Amino acid sequence: MDYLTNKDFYKAIWRWHFYAGIIFAPFLIILSITGAIYLFKPQIESVLYNDLYYVQEGEHELAPSYVIEQVKNTYENATVVSYRPSNAPNRSTEVGIVLDGKTYIVFVNPYTGDIVGKLAKEDKLMNIIVKLHGELMVGTVGDRIVELAACWAVILLITGLYLWWPRNRSLYGIVKIRFHEGKRVMWKDIHSVLAIWLSMFILLLILTGLPWAGFMGHQINQIATATHTGYPSGLWDEIPESVVPTKSVADVPWAAENMPVPESKQNGAMTIPVESVIQIAKDRHVHPGFSIYFPEGEKGVYTVSVFPNLPQDQATLHIDQYSGEVLADLRFKDYGWLAKMIEIGIALHEGRYFGLFNQLIGLVTCLGLIFIAYSGVVMWWKRRPNGALGVPPAPQSKKVMRIVTFIIIVLGLTMPLVALSLVIAFIVDWIVIRRIPKLQTWFS
């Protein structure tokens, strides 16, 4: 283990830590700010959409079919795609429609049938925050950048811990910030102390967010499906199923996204009314706050889903649109161990699992990550030479470089996008920069 204290090894780790920090600090700050905002989604939306969400409590609620008819009469060219019953005496009912190719939520007073207002789904603040948080508002490219930043954040934590480790010095540096020994020392202590104390929370935040990532999330979902540790196989017997995944017909929990949608058995009967679907959901003790998604086509099904604060209360039901037979009923207890862990992780990530306490821990972690990233940039700015980037010196030992290369390969195999970025970084750092004297001078 002597190489751990080797100066060349230290230089190599410092160099990679520097590159990753400078490149990804802006993205980590954006992710932290948007994540901190999303943590308080219930409170923020209650204020922003108060006039849409809340109504004066009445004596008797109108039949859901009547409420839907009111929406159809108001928006004649719209297609009704979902219905969310009021789940509190003062809460409006939500009817999802598609109008001119755009999805809207229409808010209706369940006691009078009056249209309170409508809101484009993509215009909701939290949906904008989610797109910024998950893909930087630029689609697939942004998704890959966000995933790459998250993966490199893990590497930054590991390499940062190594760089900070006291080595024959007191561990007092865990709590001590030297405010009176110059700004460079102060910023270094802020950077390291915050990172040490929040490292486990930051790591948890990153790992619980990766299942949503486009590339790694797809890999995780494939593993869960192949190993039956996601949704279980054999949820229904002798029921025809389509090749359509549930996520394409409804907003459902992560564990149910790839579950094939069963098909309704057309028997010439009329489609059951939405009241029957609501009653089935209640009889099956589906947690209040569920949404109903309407059948698509003659073989389509009603889909009921709910996202409560506790993953243990999640439910995804597929119901035959003609007979009312429950074709699939997926609950948390049915999930495989991997899906259970991921769903709990998602609830923690979104600040739902422990209520306000969970939100506050998430907020402290996000704010801490902002200060860690910012302080790292400040440290670099204060130590960089005039007219140069100030990259830490490259190691000279070939043995050390072999060890570092091995570590990088292991990290790359664990996080595939990291491997690609490392190949690009290697080409730039070791082949381009080292062969162009002006670049070498500027980077050094």
Image: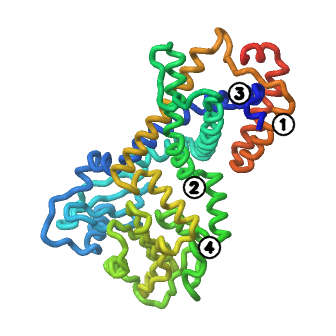
Residue 231 rendering spot, x and y as whole percentages: 56, 71
Q: Nearer the viewer, residue 367 or 128?
A: 367
**Residue 98: mark in rendering:** none
How much space separates mark 3 and mark 2, taking CA atoms?
29 Å
Of all residues, the one furthest to the left in this rendering is 59
Q: Residue under label 1, please give it.
A: 402
Q: Residue under label 4, please give it.
A: 243
Residue at 55% across / 65% down in the picture? 339
Q: Residue under label 2, please give it.
A: 211
Residue 34 rendering spot, x and y as whole percentages: 45, 40
**Residue 15: mark in rendering:** 3
SS type, badge 4: strand
How much space separates mark 4 and mark 2, taking CA atoms?
22 Å
Mark 1 or mark 3, earlier in chain: 3
SS type, badge 3: helix
How much space separates mark 3 and mark 4, taking CA atoms?
48 Å
**Taking the image as drawn, is residue 141 in sight?**
no
SS type, badge 2: helix
